[in-house]
Image (tube, rainbow, N blue to C red):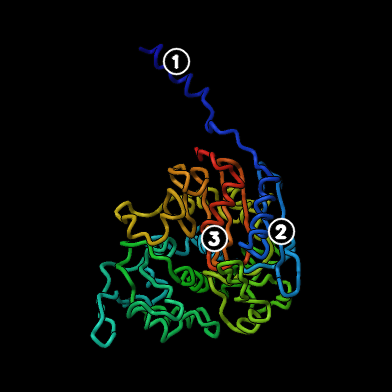
Amino acid sequence: MIGRIVAVAATLLATPLSAHEYEPDCERIAAFLDSAVAGQRVAGASAMVWKDGEERCFDAAGVADREQDRPFARDTLVQFFSMTKPVTGVALMTLWEQGRFGLDDPLYWHLPEYEHVQVLRGETETGEPITSAPSRPITVRDILRHTAGFTYGADGNPQNAADRVWEELLPLSPDKSLAEFSQAMAKVPLLFDPGTHWSYSAGVDVQARLVEVLSGKPFAQYVEETIFDPLSMDGIGWPNTRTDLHRLATIYDVGPGGTFTPVLNPDWVAAGFVGKPMTMGGGGLVGTVDDYARFALMLLGEGALGDVRILRPATVRLMATDHLDPAIAPENRSFLPGKGSGGFGFDFFVRTAPPQTPEENRGSVGEFFWDGWPSMLFWVDPQQDMVVILATQKMPFDDQLHHDFRDAVYGGEYTGR
């Protein structure tokens, strides 16, 4: 019996952790970018792959601005949109490491405006919200994993009474400070009881306000001093104080037949944000692919890049762990299941199982990532010691583009184990 156990153990030890010998194919990635431009899926894009401690691939294709025929280049500025969220989460977790809050602290202990928040239970015949107190208080953990019950509004097309309150108060107006945002946000009814649904929301902007309160510094200043400056992310920041927005790529709405309609060009971004107080936690960052790569490589290094440490390894592993209660059924997770087999950590999707079907995005168990509204994408793959970034400025958000890009990076047969 002992001999059989030893033999089995020897067999297990001899089996490689990954049966798939993987190396990035830079020519395949470059061909994907060229085909995406030629097929009028995007105006321009770039892609970067770091693996095993070095940059393995970088390529760019197309234009950053069709009207000016400006190439999409390595130093092109892009709007990261929701790829800002992991930056905010890292900033908040540096304060957790300092003992400034507990993950299961009620949010109102630190932001008193949320003590009497209400949950939408219905609406009157005239459209007024019917509300009651939540089943439990919102916790800090809830705002880190999108289980607080907050809304994101409805972008001018309200679907319910909570959306109508949002449209009235406009919490994320660029004219508001984060303090004013938070006061308004607390008046918008929650869509769900805390902890019962994964609901993508402005909760990361609440994180940003919490950073201000706990640190005693403006959010942007704290992020710059704690993350950007130590990591030498010299070209990244919020647009309200920038003077180089002429380098921005234009965001295009890409319609059927390859119609490209400018949504946000550099002049519109400047008019909307420069001189305004809002520095969102959930979006707004502007920078280059190289800027964001340094942040992502810090995450791959479990909180460190070179001699610079931002977070402890255990903290990064905590953020990159699925924190969703299994009782939150797939139908109560909004669009999250479409990202792949996994759950959600602190401001990251977390892959917990290999791809189950050919239609599912390729990726490795243990990867964590997020994306941004104009089809931006990054991921950290610890199993392959790899960081990947896709930069483009295309709306509407293109899930299929991400699927096809991951095929180009991994190959369509990648097992993910």
| Disc 1 target residue | 7
* Rendered image quadrant of residue 371: bottom right
Q: Residue at x 56, y 72 (%)?
A: 219
Q: Residue at x 61, y 81 (%)?
A: 273
Above or below, comparing residue 303 to residue 129 in the picture: above
| Disc 3 target residue | 371
Q: Position of residue 196 (x, y in %)?
A: 31, 62
The amino acid sitting under disc 3 is Asp
How far apart are the alpha carbons under marks 1 and 3? 45 Å
Q: Residue at x 64, y 84 (%)?
A: 271
The amino acid sitting under disc 1 is Ala
| Earlier sequence position, callout 2 versus callout 1 | 1
Q: Residue at x 67, y 42 (%)?
A: 25
Q: Position of residue 270 (x, y in %)?
A: 66, 81
Badge 1 element: helix
| Earlier sequence position, callout 2 versus callout 3 | 2
* Residue 229 shows up from this direction: no
Q: Position of residue 160 (x, y in %)?
A: 33, 78
Residue 306 shows which numbered tag?
none
* Residue 330 shows up from this direction: yes
Residue 61 shows which numbered tag?
2
How far apart are the alpha carbons under marks 2 and 3? 20 Å
Q: Is there CB contact under 8 Å for labels 2 and 1?
A: no
